[in-house]
Image: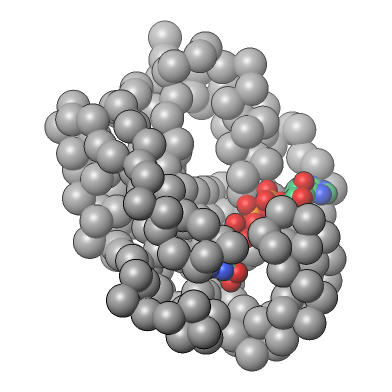
Amino acid sequence: MLIIGIAGGTGCGKTTVVNQILNQLPEGEVGVISQDSYYKDTTHLSYDERVKINFDHPRSIDFELLEQHLKDLKNGQTIEQPVYSFVKHNRTGDTIKTIPRKVMIVEGILILTHPELRDMFDIKIFVHADSDERLIRRLKRDITERGRDIDEVLSRYQNTLKPMHQQFIEPMKEYADIIIPNNKYNTVAVDIVKTIINEKLQ
Ligand SMILES: Nc1ncnc2c1ncn2[C@@H]1O[C@H](COP(=O)(O)OP(=O)(O)O)[C@@H](O)[C@H]1O
Ligand SMILES: Nc1ccn([C@@H]2O[C@H](COP(=O)(O)O)[C@@H](O)[C@H]2O)c(=O)n1
């Protein structure tokens, strides 16, 4: 199994890059695990308490479960990947059956901050987009897809997202094997990653 970790700040385009990689590759050969699925279960908290969580800090992620799931996949076992709701700020209780594939992609803002998980990646990719570009994309996406309004996105950006990005995410570039500049769609870089994956699949 080839395990590829794709990190980068919110809105840099990780999910889009993953979808571009999956597109045109043989169906069923590449699997995806999203760090968002592993936000800690917050059922014991009220909605008002959940809203206040710092979702850009590594402690918000259940890295133990994520690491265990990746190990299970490596050992040929199917896992139940939790489904997360950005509207409820909690897991939904549903899961997605995720079966081991020849290539597994793990994507998320904080996946390179956890040394044990980082060591499991054969290839580490960091997707870069400038912070103003990321904020614009996040505003548009969170308002249309994640049930947020402009005040929510901007206050989260100022209070937690920006400082956490500077403290935890940006320094992870140091560990990257490949940095994809993604202020604009970068088909050349995506094609290079696809070529690497295709070699593994042959
Ligand atoms: N290179 C790009 N140029 C312009 N918009 C982009 C680009 N990559 C992604 N987007 C858009 O930005 C938003 C956030 O992208 P997404 O892939 O969800 O980022 P991430 O997973 O890193 O948070 C989406 O609406 C997506 O369509
Ligand atoms: N309930 C939540 C959980 C997370 N977030 C934000 O999501 C961002 C990470 O996801 P991307 O798809 O953008 O990489 C992160 O910056 C969190 O602030 C949230 O808003 N609500």
Q: Tell me the residue at 56%/61% (across/down).
A: 86
Q: Position of residue 126 (x, y in %)?
A: 57, 54
Residue 52 visible:
yes
Residue 54 visible:
no
Q: Tell me the residue at 62%/49% (across/down).
A: 14
Q: Tell me the residue at 18%/30% (across/down).
A: 77
Between residues 95 and 189, which one lies in front from this camera angle?
95
Say which quadrant the N terminus sits in. top left
Relative to 80, 128 lies left or right: right
Say which quadrant the C terminus sits in. top left
The image quarter in which residue 146 lies: bottom right
Q: Quadrant of ligand 2?
A: bottom right
Q: How is the image coloured?
A: one colour
Relative to 53, 195 lies left or right: right
| Outermost residue toward the bottom in this view | 159
Q: Position of residue 156 (x, y in %)?
A: 66, 82
The image quarter in which residue 153 lies: bottom right
Q: Tell me the residue at 37%/45% (across/down).
A: 94
